Image: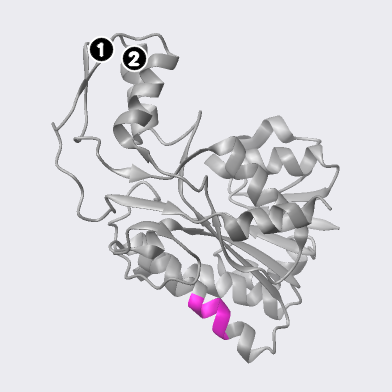
């Protein structure tokens, strides 16, 4: 079985790539620059390619190794969820790439979605709930899923689709503008205080290592799974999350709660129902 992974040099991609290699799988890692994953040189096939250029789209399936499964984790500027480029520029590029791969013979695709697709919903959310995305990033991802579902109908389900809705991840090598990275840096710099919101948000936090493990297992099931929440399944307040980081690092830094207002583009309360996820994970180990 050959698995191709896009976004292999990204925050989640590096962890997923490492797990695929450890599982002894035939892996093709797709990156813009080989230097970005130089530590994996010799452990897998690395393809240096812009998947959105016109030349790639003409024979992208062959260029990327004629994979049995594509894990599509690539997406740009995820730190700026309000950027209109998510649907104005990125959405058509991602759909065109995936459509070309499928039309060329790709039998199975696993795509990273986002909990922001749930939008205006709150509390525990299940995969069959319909929300209204509150930001361009969530909207673009939601539209891409619909496009792929319509493509399945058009092609009489010629390909399997797993849509992995990722919730709030954290870990080392995360983007610098996340609260995890910012707080860790503030602690490292011996800052006296750390400015943040009131911290009352109830969200579903999961370490990136656990996210990567779940993504890998879902991909290897190789079935037409549809939407699945990749989550912990229970909420943690942002304040508790920050306090745990402070305690873990034996820091005396003070949390300056309420310095920033809450963001209207993000939910105050959102965590995933993990029943379907657990059912699938149990299936993968049988």
Name the spot of residue 26 as percent of width and height, x first. 84, 50
Mark 2 — residue?
A: 187
Above or below for 233 versus 182: below
> What kind of element bears circle 2?
helix
Picture quadrant of residue 175 = top left
Q: Determine crowd level at label 2: few under 14, some 14-19, many 20+ residues with C-alpha closer than 10 A.
A: many
Q: Can the viewer see residue 155?
A: yes
Whole-angstrom CA distance, mark 2 to mark 1, is 6 Å
Front residue (pair 145, 28): 145
Q: Can the viewer see residue 48?
A: no
Look at the image and give the residue range highlighted in magenta: 146-150
Mark 1 — residue?
A: 191
Residue 7, numbered label: none
Q: Is residue 186 magenta?
A: no
Q: Is residue 109 left or right of residue 53?
A: right
Image quarter where the N terminus lies is bottom right
Above or below for 178 versus 80: above
Name the spot of residue 154 as percent of width and height, x first. 62, 91
Name the spot of residue 149 as percent of width and height, x first. 56, 80
Verify CB contact (< 8 Å) between mark 2 and mark 1.
Answer: yes
Q: Residue at x 29, y 8 (%)?
A: 252
Front residue (pair 81, 29): 81
Q: Residue at x 39, y 28 (%)?
A: 181
Front residue (pair 203, 48): 203
């Amino acid at each position: 079985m050959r698995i191709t992974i896009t976004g292999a040099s990204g925050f989640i991609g590096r962890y997923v790539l490492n797990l695929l290699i450890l599982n002894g799988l035939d892996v093709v890692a797709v990156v813009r620059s080989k230097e970005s994953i130089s530590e994996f040189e010799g452990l897998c096939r690395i393809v240096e390619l812009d998947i959105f250029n016109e030349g790639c789209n003409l024979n992208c399936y062959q260029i990327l190794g004629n994979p049995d499964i594509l894990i599509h984790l690539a997406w740009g500027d995820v730190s700026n969820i309000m950027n209109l480029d998510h649907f104005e520029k990125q959405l058509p590029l991602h759909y065109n790439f995936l459509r070309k791969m499928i039309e060329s013979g790709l039998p199975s695709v696993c795509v990273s979605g986002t909990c922001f697709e749930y939008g205006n919903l709150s509390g525990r959310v299940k995969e069959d709930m319909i929300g209204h995305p509150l930001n361009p990033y969530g909207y673009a991802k939601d539209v891409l899923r619909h496009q792929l579902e319509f493509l399945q109908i058009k092609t009489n389900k010629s390909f399997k689709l797993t849509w992995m809705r990722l919730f709030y991840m954290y870990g080392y090598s995360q983007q610098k503008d996340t609260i995890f990275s910012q707080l860790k840096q503030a602690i490292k710099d011996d800052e006296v205080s750390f400015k943040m919101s009131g911290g009352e948000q109830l969200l579903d936090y999961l370490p990136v290592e656990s996210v990567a493990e779940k993504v890998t297992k879902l991909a290897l099931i190789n079935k037409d799974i549809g939407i699945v929440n990749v989550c912990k399944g229970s909420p943690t307040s942002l304040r508790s999350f920050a306090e745990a980081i402070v305690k873990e690092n034996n820091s005396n830094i003070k949390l300056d709660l309420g310095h920033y207002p809450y963001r209207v583009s993000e939910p105050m309360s959102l965590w995933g129902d993990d029943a379907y996820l657990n059912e699938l994970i149990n299936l993968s180990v049988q």
